[in-house]
Amino acid sequence: ETGVTQSPTHLIKTRGQQVTLRCSSQSGHNTVSWYQQALGQGPQFIFQYYREEENGRGNFPPRFSGLQFPNYSSELNVNALELDDSALYLCASSFAGGDTEAFFGQGTRLTVV
Amino acid sequence: AQSVTQLDSQVPVFEEAPVELRCNYSSSVSVYLFWYVQYPNQGLQLLLKYLSGSTLVKGINGFEAEFNKSQTSFHLRKPSVHISDTAEYFCAVSDRPGGFKTIFGAGTRLFVKA
């Protein structure tokens, strides 16, 4: 079991609503990445945060946004939810500059109805 | 741009038999390669990684993988599987070792039968 925790574990939202997902990094890690994993697919990179700033972004629209806090925890915010946003959202923490792996949390299962 | 192709969506195998899960990648820069396992309703766990050095990489739970630069492959192998190895396996590539902007394959479902 990794030291990366995500909350909540499950969430149901209505189309058009906004959602905030949270991630607590493993101790000693300063970088957080977020991934979206649709059912039956591999995870897709959304963005990464380092020193409280976005440090790279995948092919996701601006309604996907994030924050990283001084304690390196992070939030993923999604506005104007669409049905296709239903997925498992994974957070991964790592240490920038090292060759250590990224550790993943157990994910938040978001269902948009 | 980087990409990963996992050649088999499902691999059924009998317990104690050997297994190989195939992965091909494409990249125009230096690559770091990973295999992750995902059990139902859980996150991803790293099995092994190739950063540099020996092309044969050993990981946890008896798995190993071989990096073949000429064939752009990173196939995962285990000589004898157990029922508990039933899970989804993901091959992934990154241009940095720490997991930045990691590109994942679509996954291979390994199903171990008694």
Image: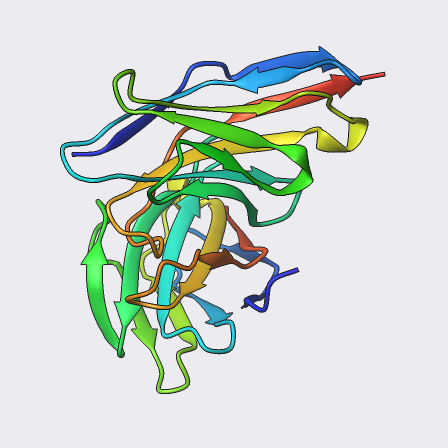
> In the displayed structure, would residue B60 be above or below residue B87?
below
Query: Looking at the image, which residue sits at the far right?
Result: B114
**Residue located at (51% from left, 42% from top):** B48
Q: Determine which quarter of the picture holds residue A56.
A: bottom left
- Looking at this view, is B53 or B25 the one in front? B53
> In the displayed structure, would residue B19 be above or below residue B52?
above
Q: Quadrant of the N terminus of chain A?
A: bottom right
Q: Position of residue B91 (x, y in %)?
A: 44, 32
- Looking at this view, is B76 or B42 the one in front? B76
> In the displayed structure, would residue A103 be above or below residue A31?
above
- Looking at this view, is A113 or A73 the one in front? A73
**Residue located at (29% from left, 16% from top):** B71
Residue A40 visible to the viewer:
no
What is the basis of the colouring in this image?
rainbow
Q: Position of residue A35 (x, y in %)?
A: 39, 51
**Residue located at (29% from left, 54% from top):** B100
Q: Determine which quarter of the picture holds residue A17.
A: bottom left
Query: Looking at the image, which residue sits at the far bottom?
Result: A70
Query: Looking at the image, which residue sits at the far front?
Result: B54
Q: Is residue A9 left or right of residue B65?
A: right
> In the displayed structure, would residue B71 be above or below residue B52?
above
Q: Is residue A69 left or right of residue A51?
A: right
Q: Determine which quarter of the picture holds residue B47.
A: top right
Q: Position of residue B99 (x, y in %)?
A: 35, 53
Residue B77 visible to the viewer:
yes
**Residue located at (28% from left, 50% from top):** B101
